[in-house]
Amino acid sequence: MATDTLTNPQDAGVEFGLKKKSRVESLIGPEWYRLLKGLVTNPLSVAGILIIVMFVLIAILAPVLAPPTRSDPYQIPRDGYGPEPKPPGTEWRSNPPDIPFWYTPLTGNEEWVHLLGTTSGQFDIWYGIIWGTRTAIFVGLVVVGVALAIGLIVGSLSGFYGGWLDDIFQRITEIFMAFPFLLAALTLTSILVPLFGRGVWPAMIALIAFGWMGYTRVVRGDILTVKERDYVMAARVIGAKDSRILIRHIIPNAVFSTMVLASLDVGAIVLSFAALSFLGVGTDIGYADWGQIVSFARDYILSLNQYWYIVLFPGMALIIFGLGWNLIGDALRDILDPRMRGSRGA
């Protein structure tokens, strides 16, 4: 008697080339699953994630890596007030921080020294870079997050409803895009500083105000494509509300390109924030901010062969931080590119 060898439906699916979905894929959907799988298997994204994780750990461990000496930990401690920077390894003479458990075994010193040197005014570079990591992560994520939210709202409404609403939103977007980004942010920050005082918020507000337009354009373009697909038409036929169609069906399938842009923008925003601090309209003097540290090198720009450490260490932090986000963004772009799907094993 002949027997049927395909008694298990799962075996039948494998026999006919059907791929069984995992629990994660069933939970988050095939597109998000492909994105998540690509992020953890793409060498570029893995390298970028490791870099960002390193900065996150530095930010979390900041009180251990650079013990605060003041009530406000974001104020860089000073070793006197001398104008000439001191090189790495110089002994800390005035009010040094407490010695953490890791310091003596790693450095071999019983007393605290300036591990990366000091700036003019004797601000400790090591402390500024460690606590400046918290500033960079906070500024980058908040500015990009708020600008992305604004761009999603404006772009979604503009692309979904079209007509006169689209015309109004796009003309407003074009007006904002007409201003050079850094110059506009510099001008607005200069206006806000007298109102709010020196700090992170005037510069952050300015970067948000002139940083949402790119997201709006990308979201609008993707929604114009997605809203014509069959599953959106089916949702309309069964009487789904516009808000449900937009939030449940359109935006989740139109946000991928915007995610790539946002991941690339985090490093760029931190660099722009540092530029505002360098130009003197960002954080207050002595605040733990990478751009603030670089600004102390302005008086020694012709002597960087001797005082190289003022620029090198904060500059490396800015470059590596931006590199991490750029690697993630490049990987996302490759994963989401339809031409790359076959080569990525999607």
Image (cartoon, helix red, strand yellow):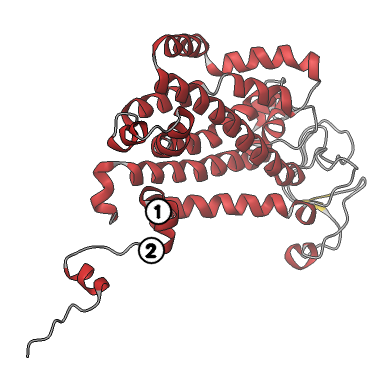
Farthest bottom residue? Answer: 1
Secondary element at image label 2: loop
Residue drawn where x is 46% and y is 55% of the image: 46
The quadrant in which the N terminus is found is: bottom left
| CA–CA distance in space, label 1 to label 2 | 9 Å
The reply to whether callout 1 and callout 2 are in contact (CB within 8 Å) is: yes
- Using the image as rendered, state which of residue 53 and residue 94 is in the foreground: 53
- Using the image as rendered, state which of residue 234 and residue 278 is in the foreground: 234
Residue drawn where x is 64% and y is 16% of the image: 186
Q: Where is residue 54 in the image (x, y as percent from the top left)?
A: 60, 54
Residue type at mark 2? Answer: Ser
Residue drawn where x is 55% and y is 36% of the image: 266
Secondary element at image label 1: helix
Residue hosting label 2: 22
Q: Can residue 46 be seen in this view?
A: yes
Sort mark 2 into few (<14), some (14-19) or many (20+) by Cα contacts within 10 Å.
few
